[in-house]
Amino acid sequence: MNSQNWIGGEWGTPNGGSHPVYNPSQMTEVVGTVFHSSTSDVRQVDQAARTALKAWTATSLPVRGEYLYTMARVLEEHATEVATLSSREMGKPISEMAGEVIRGVKLLRYYAGEGVRTNGSVIPHSQDHVLQYSTRIPLGVVALITPWNFPVAIPVWKIAPALICGNTVIWKPSEMAALTATLLTSLFAQAGLPAGVLNLLVGEGANVGKLLVSTAAVDGISFTGSTKTGMAIAAVAAERNVKYQVEMGGKNAAVVLDDADLSLSVPAILSGAFRSAGQKCTATSRLIVQADILDPFIAALREGMQEISMGDARDSATYLGPVASAAQYAKVQRYAEMAQTEEMVSQDINVTVDPAQGYFVAPHVIMGVDVESPLVQEEIFGPIATILPAADLDDAIALCNQTVYGLSASVFTRDISRGFRFLEEADAGMVRINQETAGVEYQAPFGGMKHSSSHSREQGTSALEFYSQTKTCAVYFGS
Ligand code: NAD
């Protein structure tokens, strides 16, 4: 399969260069070719989305909702095909990928329902015989820039609310998930969306993404990706006075207090740290453990790790697959080498694949690491987690907050008072008791604090706030 652009309802292959995609589980398998866009494609897509805007904005909300219901149905019908391609393209284990596609279906249905829900409010006016109300109107043309690690869910949690709010969309997916993006767009095209309402622009972030942000006549930018890129995009958007949200990295902590149920916390921590090979913005990468239960915690963790099976992403029994690409492998390997100099807690897992055939990185749990170490402070985005002992709850909260990031954090305890104190004091946008740090609910707001976000939120009704602006209207109807 090869990538294509979909601009103004037409498919085309851009000519700004290309790269082959190798299956991260089996590097000798070529999955397809990604073709990059160039400046002329950016101009063309800008025009196409602008041309389609007026009619789409004028389309009634219930009718827009019907398009989304159809997109959900078509995606559900092709769920296995999409999950399989994604697994081959970026190495997420098929069992997780299948769940992600179904999440995409649910997101589409959730936002389709917004087509018949309240779209504003009636507000009293100081004068008699005046009806005053507020209503949401679209931003206009929005640019959606997405990462590779959730190649279906993240695009859909941007595209669906953007469309239901009446915006037209230019979607620039990650160049590392562009085959999935092409398939997804071809399915959405089957829903019969009017030409130019949804456009796909494939290309490299540093070229096409940058051009889109800095030159295209867009009215909104929603970005998910690394903090470095997000901060740069935010600066350009602010300069241009374009509404933006940038959702970025994390360095998430799971705190295990001395009364925690280890049979509950250890599986949740392993899942948060190692599913998707640790390549989730909400992945658990710091395990802050109350010192007096360190020994039983480590014993339980070692036992739990023996259940982990590292294998080919296409195998439904695989828990831990490869990392996504050669670039990811090189980056994670750098940290893995750094981790080798630390005290290794365990790497005793079940391996069902020849690790040399793909971008496989064995999971690492290490301890004795200085809290200022890059292993503790930098987002690794791989299967490497660090144990940090804490004297008590105060110390654990202080360690949890000792990071520039603030995306998600969990505490494991049976004590509801200590649990609630953690929820109040942990500096993270998503805080939990006795649940893993990873995994989000599409109907609830999601976003981070500090350097994890522009302090904006996605999903749930928060997305409707981003993809619209409020108009306050008043009508004098007296004589
Ligand atoms: P990335 O920043 O490298 O790329 C993200 C997207 O931005 C891609 O589409 C890329 O092509 C594009 N891009 C790159 N440079 C650009 C530029 N100068 N201008 C415009 N666009 C540009 O991130 P990634 O490696 O694809 O994704 C991994 C990162 O995403 C991790 O840091 C992870 O924590 C983060 N992430 C955050 C969330 C969240 O909701 N907070 C969710 C998933 C992933």
Image (cartoon, rainbow, N blue to C red):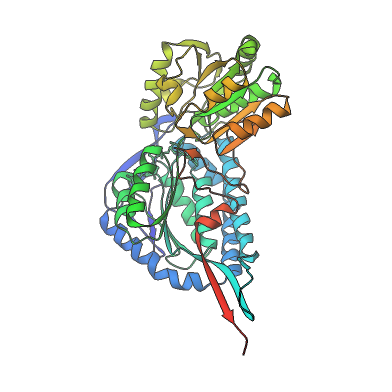
Please indicate whether residue 394 sits to the left or right of residue 31 in the image. right
Q: Residue at x 62, y 86 (%)?
A: 478
- Which quadrant does the C terminus fall into? bottom right
Residue 316 appears in the figure:
no
Q: Residue at x 40, y 38 (%)?
A: 227
Please indicate whether residue 233 sits to the left or right of residue 425 in the image. left
Toward the viewer: 314 or 394? 394
Please indicate whether residue 258 sits to the left or right of residue 453 in the image. right
Q: Is residue 82 above or below residue 385?
A: below
Q: Position of residue 24 (x, y in %)?
A: 43, 32
Toward the viewer: 447 or 42? 447
* Residue 440: quarter of image: top right
Q: Position of residue 115 (x, y in %)?
A: 61, 64
Q: Position of residue 159 (x, y in %)?
A: 50, 55
Q: Residue at x 48, y 70 (%)?
A: 56
Toward the viewer: 28 or 65? 65
Q: Dividing the image into four quarters, tell me where ligand 1 lies.
A: top left
Q: Position of residue 287 (x, y in %)?
A: 56, 21
Please indicate whether residue 437 sits to the left or right of residue 20 in the image. right
Q: Is residue 29 above or below residue 457?
A: above
Q: Is residue 134 above or below residue 318?
A: below
